[in-house]
Amino acid sequence: MSSIHPLHPPTMPSAKRSSDSTATKRSPASSGTRSQGPSRFSPVRLLQAPSVLLLLAWMIVPLAMTIYFSLNRYNLMAPDQTGFVGLENYQFLLEDPAFWPSIANTALLIGSVLVISVIGGTLLAVLFDQPFRGRGIARLLVIGPFFVMPTVAALIWKNMIMHPVYGMLAFVMRHLGLQPIDWLAEYPMLSVIIIVSWQWIPFAFLILLTALQSLDGDQKEAAQLDGAGPIRIFFYIVLPHLKRAITVVIMIETIFLLSVFAEIFTTTAGGPGTETTNLTYLVYSIGLQQFDIGIASAGGIFAVVLANIVSFFLVRMLAKNLKGVNEK
């Protein structure tokens, strides 16, 4: 029998130690393997680089040039009088008598069109969600105004509908014994709001109808069995279901309505006075009518900042809405 010394514990066999060390070296935690994602200079990133650089140039170069001109004196009527003026163009813009009315007109136009298009689109979506003969053709007629160019739509309303002599509204009012109204002269902002709303109601209708068609019919049937009428079903089932779609409509329309120009240019040219001058038309009038590129560029930067602020809050509102829906 072999004896074991108490001061020397027994050692592991050499074969087992070598196998354990080999297993340790081969373990994933200690091997230090790289992630499977694309590296910084992988072929995928190299192929994406031209498109990314093109998009950056597409956005950054015009913005940088606008910022440059907004900080310099540059009037096409006096091209020899140039130089760095700092924030002087922004000061002139803020002191322009037409600036703050243009901000108010922009807010009024956007708010009014949003209310009209959301309410009108919701009612049309509820109506066209019901089965009736000729529903497909009727839907095409409803969404038709959205595909009409803004300039063409403005000319149609100006010359064929709102004209005080041979417009359709004047024809109807004369047959009713009423005095025709010169809409673009007496109610210019209301006329522009009607024209723009006529174009954007079909967009809201399409989004809301698509969302409404995803509503489960069993909920309506259960509510009807419980004695709920059409009004209660609309306010307690249909509207909560359309909440997310309405938020999307508001976000997209607001971004596009900030740049309404063709309707105003074609119908009222910003007048009478400044009653229909929004921020977009003010920048146009300063840059291409007064030929002051510096102040017009300052107005463009202000419009970009305003659009980004509005977009930030709208995106947050949409994200909050989506988060609430997912939590349910």
Image (spheres, rainbow, N blue to C red):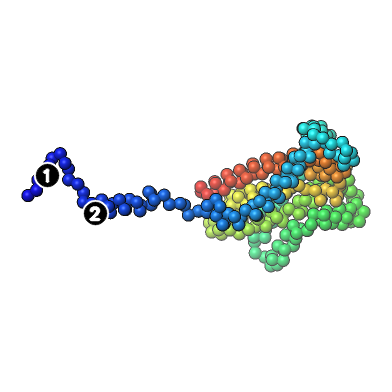
Give left or right: position of 63 versus 243: right
Query: In this view of the protein, which residue sits in the foreground, 30 or 288?
Result: 30
Give left or right: position of 289 versus 314: right
Q: Position of residue 159 (x, y in %)?
A: 88, 55
* Amino acid, disc 2: Ala
Give left or right: position of 103 versus 231: right
Tell me the residue at 28%/54% (across/down): 19
| Disc 2 residue crowd, few under 14, some 14–19, many 20+, Cα 10 Å | few
Q: Residue furthest bottom?
A: 133
Q: Quadrant of residue 316?
A: top right
Q: Is any part of residue 231 visible from this angle?
A: no
Q: Is residue 139 above or below residue 242?
A: below
Q: Is any part of residue 296 visible from this angle?
A: yes
Tell me the residue at 70%/46% (across/down): 60
Check disc 2 and report its element: helix, strand or loop.
helix
Q: Position of residue 42 (x, y in %)?
A: 55, 55
Q: Which mark is residue 4?
A: 1
* Amino acid, disc 1: Ile
